[in-house]
Amino acid sequence: MNKTSSSEIWLIVDSRQFGGIETHVLQLAQGLIAHQQLVKVWLVSRYSSPSPICTKLKTLGINYDYLGGDDAQASHLRALSNLIHLLKQQRPLLVHAHGYRASILSKIAKLLTRSHQISTYHAGENPSGRVKLYDWLDRISAFVSNQSLVVSHAIADKIPTHSHYLNNFIDCQSISFQHGQSIAFVGRLSSEKAPDRFCRLAANFPSLHFDIYGTGPLKQQIDTIAGKNVHGHGHQSEMDTVWPTISVLVICSEFEGLPMVALEAMARGIVVIASRVGELPNLIINGENGWLAHDEATFSEQLQLWKSLSDEGQLAMRVNATNTIHQHYSQQAVIPKLLKIYHAVSTQFDSQIAN
């Protein structure tokens, strides 16, 4: 591995599938490069089935590599050992970790190398099993990081030290105003995403077409309860071909931070009907650029209200949604703020970070 410039930012993530964290990392890497910042993405493990993020990084010409080997437990120890060696050898400007595994490993490496390290906390749900332990360890060790970033204020409440809220963001310049006719659920089929609510919503509108894009532990249950007007398409590695078919995105989650799918949909003029969780109430102004629901009955009411709007009324809401993303949730709006945080951390002047 070649020696890198000391001005390079390292983004670290452990990735099997392509979800919200991977989307964020990809958008972040693109945004940093667009702002003339050197960047490299490090994947914690090289899994037997490569993560879809690899193809996307390669297509975009973004430099990436692996810290560990295959998916054996020893891979994480090897990843930590390699990260420590690389930090001592190459001294990047700072390390920015995403997800609990990358965060824990990079914080250990920080303590042993005295490098600059930032963690972004994405998860708003309460995990179970072994992940619950790792998630707790990641949060309780937040004091190790030079800075902790969060994508929602609810997540900040779970971090025992000071954290900095920063909007999620996307590259609006590569997205066109385009939508289709279907009503869609896009995400993991897991309890916190509540895909069963989506199926019950579809049952109230038998004449409309509903699509589910995603897979997960509840797939069998969803296949069982889904009505004839609900069509499952499984995990999608390339959503760019799917978005143009969607008119309305339904986010019926019990927990969220600021979901990337909401930003991607609204940037295209796709209307979002969402639960009042996480930062969604700050993103969506009810009845102006989308709809908010506090229970299952409200989801049906909001969808009915949307259907009752004139073509002009629907177009106005779509335009409002797009404008919201461009003004507050684009790379152009957020990356300069993040670069200021990077500069403050790398020069050890944390007090300069703007609130």
Image: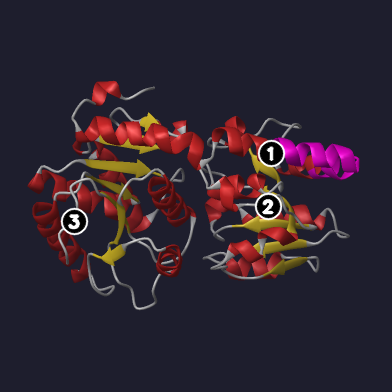
Q: Nearer the viewer, residue 162 or 1?
A: 1
Q: Label 2, label 3: how many angstroms apart (C-alpha)?
A: 49 Å
Q: Earlier in the sequence, mark 1 or mark 3?
A: 3
Residue 294, position as x, y percentages in the image: 67, 36
Label 2 neighbour load within 10 Å: few <14, some 14-19, many 20+: some
For the residue labelled by badge 2, is the local secondary structure a helix, a strand or a loop?
helix
User: Looking at the image, do the residues carrying marks 1 and 2 touch, with CB atoms under 8 Å apart?
Assistant: no
Q: Label 1, label 3: how many angstroms apart (C-alpha)?
A: 41 Å
Which residue is at the far bottom?
48
Residue 23, position as x, y percentages in the image: 47, 54
Decide whether the magenta segment is chiefly helix, strand or loop.
helix
Q: Amino acid at mark 3?
A: Thr
Q: Earlier in the sequence, mark 2 or mark 3?
A: 3
For the residue labelled by badge 1, is the local secondary structure a helix, a strand or a loop?
helix
Task: Answer with left or right where residue 292 lies relative to residue 101.
Answer: right
Quadrant of the frame with the N terminus? bottom left
The region drawn magenta spans 303-320
